[in-house]
Image: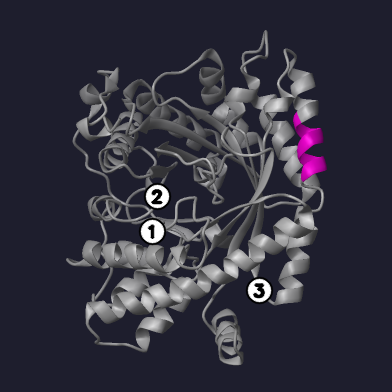
Amino acid sequence: MINTMEIMETIKMISEEHLDVRTVTMGISLLSCAANDMDTVCTRIYDKITRQAENLVKTASDIETEFGIPIINKRISVTPAALVCESIKNSESFVKIALALDRAAKTTGVDFIGGFSALVHKGATRGDCLLIDSIPEALAATDKLCSSVNVGTTKAGLNMDAVKKMGQIIKHTAALTADSDGFGCAKLVVFCNAVEDNPFMAGAFHGVGEPDAVINVGVSGPGVVKCALEKVHGADFGTVADTIKNTAFKITRMGQLVAQEASRRLGVPFGIVDLSLAPTPAVGDSVAYILEEMGLEQCGTHGTTAALALLNDAVKKGGVMATSYVGGLSGAFIPVSEDAGMIAAAQSGALSLEKLEAMTCVCSVGLDMICVPGDTSAETLSAIIADEAAIGMVNNKTTAVRLIPAPGKKVGDVVEFGGLLGSGPVMAVNERSSCDFIHRGGRIPAPIHSLRN
């Protein structure tokens, strides 16, 4: 039973501690939209999305009003477009597909649509190659479209040809969106072990193992966890872990309530709740501040990785007690530009790219929303992707890279994105070359522990 005290506590979390549902995301299968003709595919895609998601935004807004729970984003994820477009004949570009997806997103009123994606962890088909080559122009020509490419898995190893290619694609995307400091790159994620039910952008896509349509919800609440830890200031780590678990339980219950209600009203199955603590640029809504509340002078100093490991584990343990259907990425996000504490730590020099990489070994996603100098080479970008993908491959976890080589910017400059994306300080990269390493090509084999059958 929910008592009056719990209701009042939740109201306080929402009004004072930045508690929100970060996203209600409808996944939609586009496999039925395949055809030989480009225009036919575009029409089918637009028609299916606008029909299926016609009431998504209104329903989420109604729930937000009726329950008093902020729902920050309403989003759509679709089947990786490379799969849908494989059958199209006589086409050298999939930009028309991107425009159809973007147009559907605008018609339905969602904030973002994800799924301009390819899965090339073991190799690429003609459709995969066409989609990847289309990414820079697609992201430059659209407003709401997000793109992702999976370049490795624990079972398959790392496709280093794809890793090399994605460094070039990121550079090209930055160049085509130079007037917005390379903003197109903020909508492009490179994955290892990508999951099929992720509700968060820019990496969301609707996997082939999913139903025709589904509702997935991503919760948030770093500010709530920070406030809870303030009440046990100076306590031992067992108390810290229990406090985070109890708080994550309450946050997740709220997310499941929203997910089930949206599912019922839309007539679409409820999929999963993603437990991730997703920060914002708002003061107090920061994962870095949680780590600092544990006793670190500033995020990035020695002890940061241990603190983040505790946080990530406790969030998962608390969340899985609140819902039977946990999925997505589920953990603590550490994007630099979207987290006020991370931004401050990077600007002060306490947080380096190397320390961020170490932190990604114990938390969700990876090197996320990191601005680097505009003259960073494609090979260096590829090498950063390879390092992060290797962490995911060896540790059997999802890792990702969202790098923004901001044209004309150098270390110490600040890139302004606005909204949830905030602003990002340009961080230094190692100036030693990785060129020969990246140009070897081929595949890095899967680790021995992948042979579990």
Against 49, is 355 above or below? below
Q: Alpha-carbon neighbours of circle 2 within 10 Å: few (<14), some, or many (≥20)?
A: many
376 lies left or right of 270: left
Region rendered in magenta: 45-52
Look at the image and tell me whether residue 282 can be seen: no
| SS at circle 2 | loop
Against 33, is 296 above or below? below
Q: What residue type is labelled 3?
A: Ile
Where is residue 291 shown, x and y percent of the image?
31, 72
Where is residue 360 shown, x and y percent of the image?
30, 52
Residue 391 lies in what quarter of the image?
top left
The numbered mark, 1 or 3, whose residue comes first in the sequence reads 3
The residue pinned by badge 2 equals: 365
Q: Is residue 50 magenta?
A: yes
The mark found on residue 69 in the picture is: 3
* In the image, farthest residue toward the bottom: 5
Q: In which quarter of the image is the N terminus?
A: bottom right
Look at the image and tell me whether residue 383 can be seen: yes
The residue pinned by badge 1 equals: 334
Which residue is at a point 61% across and 31% down the rendered structure image? Answer: 138
Residue 57 lies in what quarter of the image?
bottom right
